Amino acid sequence: MAIRKPETKIGTCNANQILVRDKDLVEDLIGKVGFTDMIYFHILNRMPTPTETKVLDSVLVTLMEHGFTPSAIASRMIAMSDPTAIQSAVAAGILGIAGVFVGTMEGTAQNLYAIIDSEDSVEVAAEKIAKEYRAAKKPIPGFGHPIHIPDDPRSPKLFEVALEAGVDGKYINALKVLSTKVDEAWGRHLTINATGAIGAVLCEIGLPWDIMRGIAVISRAAGLVGHFAEEKESPSGYYIMSAIEEQIPYTGNRQLD
Amino acid sequence: MAIRKPETKIGTCNANQILVRDKDLVEDLIGKVGFTDMIYFHILNRMPTPTETKVLDSVLVTLMEHGFTPSAIASRMIAMSDPTAIQSAVAAGILGIAGVFVGTMEGTAQNLYAIIDSEDSVEVAAEKIAKEYRAAKKPIPGFGHPIHIPDDPRSPKLFEVALEAGVDGKYINALKVLSTKVDEAWGRHLTINATGAIGAVLCEIGLPWDIMRGIAVISRAAGLVGHFAEEKESPSGYYIMSAIEEQIPYTGNRQLD
Amino acid sequence: MAIRKPETKIGTCNANQILVRDKDLVEDLIGKVGFTDMIYFHILNRMPTPTETKVLDSVLVTLMEHGFTPSAIASRMIAMSDPTAIQSAVAAGILGIAGVFVGTMEGTAQNLYAIIDSEDSVEVAAEKIAKEYRAAKKPIPGFGHPIHIPDDPRSPKLFEVALEAGVDGKYINALKVLSTKVDEAWGRHLTINATGAIGAVLCEIGLPWDIMRGIAVISRAAGLVGHFAEEKESPSGYYIMSAIEEQIPYTGNRQLD
Amino acid sequence: MAIRKPETKIGTCNANQILVRDKDLVEDLIGKVGFTDMIYFHILNRMPTPTETKVLDSVLVTLMEHGFTPSAIASRMIAMSDPTAIQSAVAAGILGIAGVFVGTMEGTAQNLYAIIDSEDSVEVAAEKIAKEYRAAKKPIPGFGHPIHIPDDPRSPKLFEVALEAGVDGKYINALKVLSTKVDEAWGRHLTINATGAIGAVLCEIGLPWDIMRGIAVISRAAGLVGHFAEEKESPSGYYIMSAIEEQIPYTGNRQLD
């Protein structure tokens, strides 16, 4: 197999200068742009507009912290086992940012891109998608929440912030139309959940769906550093370990002598 | 062993409301604070001043991207092996944020906290530390760089940004004094490198030394998402694999038939 | 959501005794069974026959070491960055045991289980599968190899060892029939590769397809410990880092001053 | 910095042949050696004697499974979040094989190597070490156990298996002498725990102390595949998540409206 010679546009440096994506790190970036700008700039290879920064900030703030999630528990278990290695605790936790809990962001975005790119009207395209999922008895990504019933309070806020910041609004609109069709197809109200809303607003600022999970990874990495810090001050690890050991009964056939 | 019942101050929620560290996520945070503010707030449990945000932004921007580092290569190898799992690629890469490459940030901060907390004058305390490392023939964290000779251009910029943003400056000053003593002890000029400067400015904004590595983890997580995005567009994985296979000779005693 | 109360059959202990899956660790296992037996026993919850142990040994030996694979390179990069943390180096590497390189083992097993469970004859079922993949222009798992042309030498050996050890042979046979149909459908010879053969022999000893990747993970964990040991004695990390940095050209629009 | 050109003795291959550490994988290894032999061979670059295989087997069997440890809980949390990725679940779990729980194996081995290499008699060298730890009020690695009181039943079994298999016994003896001195220094009986005993028997078969953690990583990787398999059949993840959420009280100053 002939392997195409690779190249990079990410950066280069010499003794006096560091370039990152065609900008001078020292002259153009440090002290001039914020971290959120830099994230957008590095991933999409162009500096964001203030609208885009505002939306990305709102998403990163929303995703950071969700309490004792499976990721946070995994991370705390590793923090307890290796209290000097923040990187190990964070790595363990972010491995949980996958299909079950965050995949819905990507799935929502795929559906919204499909609706907008469809030759059908938004109404028709959205209705087709809702009916397809329902017929297949599959959960539709971006809808429903076990706790936030009837409605997830984060979703309207994310739409409001994005629209006030100046996004076009067509993906938000498509999600709202889809929401109506979902309620019809299911015969009851399913909330647009936060990952659904995030999928829509990230579409508004041009994130490809297959990179969106990366935004969750960055934000949760910060959340997990917060858990690491709390675990140092107020440890929960030994409690979790012994509680679980005690609460999950051993049901083997042979008992201890 | 009696295990102290744990508690958490991170957050809680019900159907309508989500609290994160005593703030209402929807009312007080989304759309109101930036990601950098939120990172500081979550880790240190208090909202940063504009000075603190500015400094943390400058650090996060500085650390994000360093080209084909060991972390980035590890991450690209996993991206190539599992192109659907950004989280795995990022997790593999951040495991490299450890003693060899980033530990110097923590080591610098520990030395600076020791100098400031010492009963000796800054001059005397700094001189003692420089001489101790030199006598033990150990590299002193925060000094020297293989490429940026004679001086790392990022360090004065980080000091400038922090001082203009309004930090007190005592840790920056301590690092500069330490630098003079290091040059004396070594008999030649060693630059204050970027991780050294970062150690100092993070001390200025109140980060404990044992959490600092977490800041690098967050920033590099973003950098690695950028590498993942480039790997999708312009793959380097197969090239790296075959180049390494070819360039590292097999020197076993037995040869292929 | 009502959550079913979990239970575990894995083990329990008190001050004097440790039970693992209904056996006394000290009395029944340590010194009495080998590691390979214990792996099978723990995963499948029954002690293997000598045939099953022999086959599992042959698979674990085959998978352990493949030189500077992407996993091994990732692992070496982390070993270099954190030379005290074998666990981090191994964790980074095993994240690469995913769809691209090892998924073919699972795919092969799924196809073989489908052929054997089909109402069609093996011939007919195999032909259908081969034609489906070909029509969809998809690579068929378990066939083809970039280096081992025309044939992968490991595959016949794995079949031979398994058959001599006493397996029934129906999955091996199904794979051979499938191989004929693949060659017909593609119009040229594609070798049964090692992961294909492994898929077949693991079917012979009762491994469910969705656990097979775990066998690769265990075996490669051992391989990566070997790489870690070599990296200590004869480091390659700095070379890899600087070779890659040098060989992947920066092609941004802006050049260094 | 001039970088030494690296080399590898691990292996090489061409179309027809695969060499691993000077042996032909197909002719000399598959079907001829067991997995445990192969682990020893790959890490230490020489084929083990039957004595060495027996001892390594006993260690790998002992370490594999310990119930709902922090590693296992972390692994189950990731298995629940990403049920298709065994490698992620295992990687998360093995990040917990670090100082707190397994470091004692290495610490024991370092102490035993120091005793044997000392110019003092075993008695004197052991006494010095015991007194040093005690004076520094530090726990001495390899001694004490929270559950197995007064004695860990695995340790005498590991010694028995190793001695019957034919090891020299000098490290086992040194650990027993050290045990007497520890009891004297502490003024009460501390058991030789399993990781202590494992440290001794791995010294007997020539493992360097800084590779020993790798043996635990391999064995636990297998244990975690067992947990993954049980999690599929009898899920505990949702229970753990909700139990922890419920049992760790939120103690922030602000309460939900």
Image: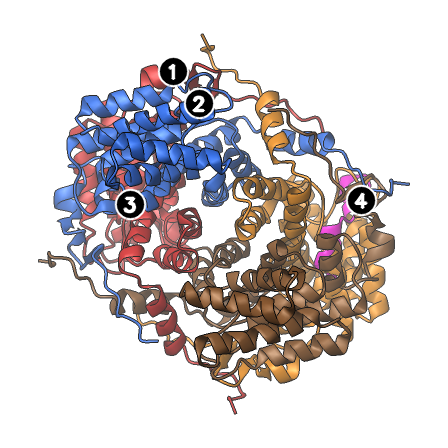
Chain colours: A orange, B brown, C red, D blue
Q: As shown in the figure, which amino acid type bears the numbered disc 4?
A: Glu
Q: Residue furthest bottom?
A: C257
**Overall secondary structure of the magenta stretch?**
helix
Query: Between C76 and C161, which is closer to the camera in this rendering?
Result: C76
Picture coordinates of residue B160 (x, y %)?
Answer: 69, 80
Residue under numbered circle 4: A184
Q: Nearer the viewer, mark 2 or mark 3?
A: 2
Q: As shown in the figure, which amino acid type bears the numbered disc 2?
A: Leu
Could you tell whether C50 is left or right of C82 in the image? left
Disc number at residue D190?
2
Asked which quadrant contains residue C115, the reply is top left
Say what secondary structure mark 3 lies in: helix
Residue under numbered circle 1: C24
Which chain letter matches label 3? C
Residue under numbered circle 3: C63
Res A122 visible: no
Say what secondary structure mark 4 lies in: helix
Q: Quadrant of the C terminus of chain A?
A: top left
Picture coordinates of residue B104 (x, y %)?
Answer: 52, 64
Q: As shown in the figure, which amino acid type bears the numbered disc 1?
A: Asp
Res C237 visible: yes
Say what secondary structure mark 2 lies in: loop
Asked which quadrant contains residue B125, the reply is bottom right
Q: CA distance from mark 4 to mark 1?
A: 58 Å
Q: Residue at x 29, y 29 (%)?
A: D123
Could you tell whether C152 is left or right of D223 in the image? left
Give the magenta-colored segment's residue range: A182-201
Q: CA distance from mark 3 to mark 4?
A: 52 Å
Q: CA distance from mark 2 to mark 4?
A: 68 Å
Picture coordinates of residue B70 (x, y %)?
Answer: 43, 64
Q: Are marks 1 and 2 on the same chain?
A: no
